[in-house]
Image (cartoon, rainbow, N blue to C red):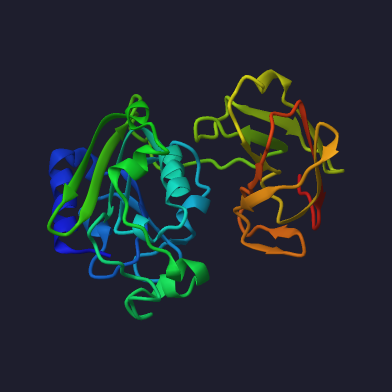
């Protein structure tokens, strides 16, 4: 969705950083064309538009926090007038940072304090907000975001070498651009190899982030039994872990989770497309399941049943 003030801001960022808008690999979160599309900002770019339903200017249908494209892939990631409607805006923004290349540009606009609620079942017709009205609890969610909200879950100075927040008092917009820390390396073409994972892995959520550094990988076990030794990680402050089974699995059942030999089952969520009768059904190749851990365990054991298959 677009409005004049937001379009003007995006144009100003293009004028400030023109190289990020030409011959680049671009991801647009919330890309549905309603009153205009961000695709028009970019010249000779490989552009991928993502939104939660099929529509004009949408290339991939996915929620932003569930998008499982490779790490450090995109030169530029943009999202406009989206986050105020995103129940998982924190996870979405963290996922954006994960997919953004070092030296890449992240640009967003969204509603801030003072903007009337819009796009919900209480305020809009389905014609005005077609995707939101079709997604249950999302149709009733709304939150005007502030700089403080963003800083609560991101250490902005740690993530970005150059950044700026701004507020438009006329349209009640929150604006942000950030250049991710690290050396920018131009793409040699746009080929990205997504490898099939032949292992299962857990990631510890430390300081709001999952990383390879704070993870443990175990070889694939056709019996679905994985025992992760966490004793070397007890000094870290974490209360959540992410379990990634092999990435070509379609259906799995979590039979049990055992923490220090005591049965424990507190699954917070997943990026499964469907969940029924304790079966997680994935229509993509990079499944993740999120679990709360109440105390720092020595050993975390997970027993998984691969319902359909394992392909070598």
**Residue 127 quadrant:** bottom left
Q: Nearer the viewer, residue 162 or 76?
A: 162
Residue at image x 71%, y 47%? Answer: 266
Residue 185 location (% of width, % of height): 34, 29
Q: Nearer the viewer, residue 144 or 105?
A: 144
If the image is split into quadrants, where does the N terminus sit? bottom left
225 in relation to 212, above or below: below
Residue 298 visible to an observer of this rendering:
yes
Residue at image x 47%, y 46%? Answer: 91
189 vs 228, left or right, is left
Residue at image x 23%, y 66%? Answer: 36
If the image is split into quadrants, where does the C terminus sit? top right
Residue 116 location (% of width, % of height): 26, 66
Residue at image x 66%, y 22%? Answer: 233
Residue 43 visible to an observer of this rendering:
no
**Residue 112 quadrant:** bottom left
Q: Nearer the viewer, residue 223 or 152?
A: 152
194 vs 79, left or right, is right
Residue 184 location (% of width, % of height): 32, 28
286 in relation to 186, above or below: below
Residue 102 location (% of width, % of height): 37, 30
User: How many circles with numbers are drawn on the protein?
Assistant: 0
């Amino acid at each position: 969705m677009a409005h004049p003030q937001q379009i003007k801001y995006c144009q100003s960022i293009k004028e400030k950083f023109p190289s990020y808008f030409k011959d680049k690999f671009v991801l647009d979160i919330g890309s549905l064309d309603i009153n205009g599309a961000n695709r028009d900002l970019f010249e000779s770019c490989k552009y991928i538009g993502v939104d939660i339903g099929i529509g004009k200017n949408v290339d991939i249908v996915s929620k932003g926090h569930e998008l499982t494209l490779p790490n450090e892939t995109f030169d530029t990631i943009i999202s406009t007038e989206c986050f105020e409607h995103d129940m998982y805006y924190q996870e979405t923004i963290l996922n954006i940072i994960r997919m953004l290349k070092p030296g890449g540009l992240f640009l967003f606009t969204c509603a801030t304090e003072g903007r009337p609620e819009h796009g919900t079942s209480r305020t809009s017709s389905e014609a005005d907000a077609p995707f939101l009205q079709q997604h249950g609890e999302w149709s009733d969610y709304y939150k005007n975001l502030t700089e403080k909200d963003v800083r609560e879950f991101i250490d902005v100075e740690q993530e970005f070498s150059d950044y700026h927040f701004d507020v438009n008092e006329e349209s009640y917009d929150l604006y942000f651009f950030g250049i991710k820390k690290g050396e920018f390396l131009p793409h040699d073409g746009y080929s990205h190899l997504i490898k099939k994972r032949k292992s299962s892995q857990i990631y510890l959520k430390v300081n709001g982030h999952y990383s390879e550094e704070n993870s443990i990988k175990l070889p694939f076990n056709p019996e679905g039994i994985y025992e992760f030794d966490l004793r070397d990680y007890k000094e870290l402050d974490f209360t959540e872990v992410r379990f990634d089974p092999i990435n070509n699995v379609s259906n799995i059942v979590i039979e049990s989770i055992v923490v220090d030999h005591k049965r424990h089952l507190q699954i917070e969520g997943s990026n499964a497309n469907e969940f029924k009768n304790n079966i997680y059904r994935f229509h993509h190749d990079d499944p993740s399941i999120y679990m709360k851990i109440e105390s720092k365990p020595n050993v975390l054991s997970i027993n998984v049943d691969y319902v359909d298959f394992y392909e070598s």
